[in-house]
Amino acid sequence: MKTLLIVKHSKLYHIYNGEGERVAILASREDIHFYIKHIFCPPLFTSYTLKPTVVAGTFIVTVK
């Protein structure tokens, strides 16, 4: 299982890997879904979830 942290800062989304390193800065939610499906996920991944956290504008992505 792999995890990403997505933090909205102003109008951009900052993407961090499980080690806390920023790996991307994206402009829209559509860009986030593209990044997850085509760059972050391994080929033939089964599913991913995008869950909001208790901090506004912050999400956690888990890929199974």
Image (cartoon, grey):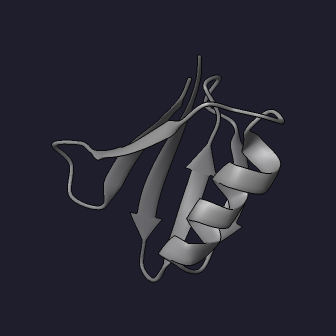
The image quadrant of residue 20 is top right
The N terminus: image quadrant:
top right
Q: Is residue 37 above or below residue 10?
A: above
Considering every residue shown, the one lying at the far left of the view is 54
Considering every residue shown, the one lying at the far top of the view is 1
Q: From the viewer's side, name the closer residue of 37 and 20.
A: 37
The image quadrant of residue 32 is bottom right
Q: Is residue 36 above or below residue 41?
A: below
Which percent across, then down, holds residue 33? 58, 62
Residue 58 is left or right of residue 64, and the answer is left
What residue lies at 60% left-to-right and 25% top-to-bottom? Answer: 18
What residue lies at 53% left-to-right and 79% top-to-bottom? Answer: 28
What residue lies at 84% left-to-right and 36% top-to-bottom? Answer: 43
Which percent across, then down, holds residue 40? 74, 43
Which percent across, then down, holds residue 52? 26, 48
The C terminus: image quadrant:
top right
Which percent across, then down, holds residue 54? 15, 42
